[in-house]
Image: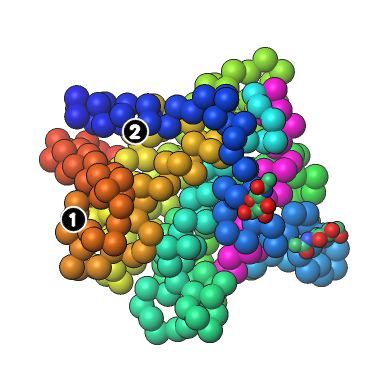
Amino acid sequence: MAFFALWSYVLVGCFSISTAEIETFNLSALYPPKWEESPSQFSNYTSQNGKYVVNPWVYPERLGLYKILLSKTAKYFQRFGKDNEQNPLWGLPLQHGWQYSSGRLADPTRTTDCGYESDPLCISEDSWWADLNYFLCVLPVLGAVDSGIMGISSDQLVLLLPPKDGLRFCNSVSSCQSSYPETMKKWKAFYQNIQLPFTSFDDNLKYLWAAHTSTLEETLKKFEDRFVYYSNPEVEFEKAWCVSVDYFASLHLHTTLIRIHEFQRGLPSRILVNEDKIPFIKDFSDFQNIFLLGLDTLYKVDSASGLTQQRYPEL
Ligand SMILES: *[C@@H]1O[C@H](CO)[C@@H](O)[C@H](O)[C@H]1NC(C)=O
Ligand SMILES: *[C@@H]1O[C@H](CO)[C@@H](O)[C@H](O)[C@H]1NC(C)=O
């Protein structure tokens, strides 16, 4: 346990950034890929019979949901800093942007062109990363719709299901509420909390992380069957990432724009292959190798002590 605490504090400490430093960042350079071109309002999506139709299996369309969410919640975080930089919801689209740029949204079975050169914006339903991210996008967004923050009513939004396995994905406030009642309740609690006039920044983070970890706990087990599509090092990394998220959550890691951008420099910039030996991956920086070693050690110790299995029996 001491190891995790130490390693996590080192990581968190690394990303303490002063206000003076924040001034020097060019924020728009830190946005996820294709942020500028993504929908910034519901009217940018196609509409049918007065409903907005969003296909969350296309990268800019999923990213647009985050972009609208970030802009609709900006006013609640204004007092913590300018330009929405302190909005803790940044963690979600930045993570999705990394998944996109590192090739993790592409079809891992390689039976389709989804996510490759001829169809680069396609998000594959067979991608483990894309599936979990679906819920880390749709549940927070639908929670916000249901809380009245998005400026539309829940029956005004239609989310398209992926072609093969649609039944695994809820796609409306009512279907997500019935499949994931605990998690939806937690996202709504987060939105209620941010609207309180005197809530602290740390309190917001507490509610955010509670909703985030609940989302993973409720959805992870549904996508174990995707692990077979990946190399052993990638599967190990996927599991280590899930376990680490709980530690980041317990430390209330700040999921603001600059911090997460810096933090993500440690993440692998491509899918791991069988030849990859942490921490000796040649095309990765020292920081990436150390970061991966830290995650892997955290996972091994957590798993050996039986903690992982208590939270995630499937890992
Ligand atoms: C900030 O970054 C964006 C995107 O990389 C670029 O277009 C813009 O010119 C930069 N602005 C400044 C002031 O450097
Ligand atoms: C979204 O709609 C607004 C207003 O019509 C427009 O200015 C903007 O360029 C659109 N954005 C995209 C990505 O289509």
Q: Nearer the viewer, residue 218 or 230?
A: 230
Q: Are marks 2 and 1 in contact (CB under 8 Å)?
A: no
Q: Quadrant of the N terminus?
A: top left
Q: Quadrant of residue 4?
A: top left
Between tags 2 and 1, which lies in front? Answer: 1
Magenta segment range?
A: 57-79
- Within-10-Å neighbours for mark 1: few <14, some 14–19, many 20+: some
Q: Position of residue 7 (x, y in %)?
A: 26, 31
Is 5 part of what is drawn in magenta? no
Residue 11, labelled with which disc? 2
Residue kind at label 1, given as amino acid type? Phe
Q: Which residue is mark 1?
A: 280
Q: Position of residue 199 (x, y in %)?
A: 63, 18
Q: Which residue corresponds to the image point at 38% horizontal and 31% vertical from the top-left?
A: 14
**250 is higher (above) or lower (below) than 29:** above
Q: Position of residue 303 (x, y in %)?
A: 18, 42
**179 is higher (above) or lower (below) than 203:** below
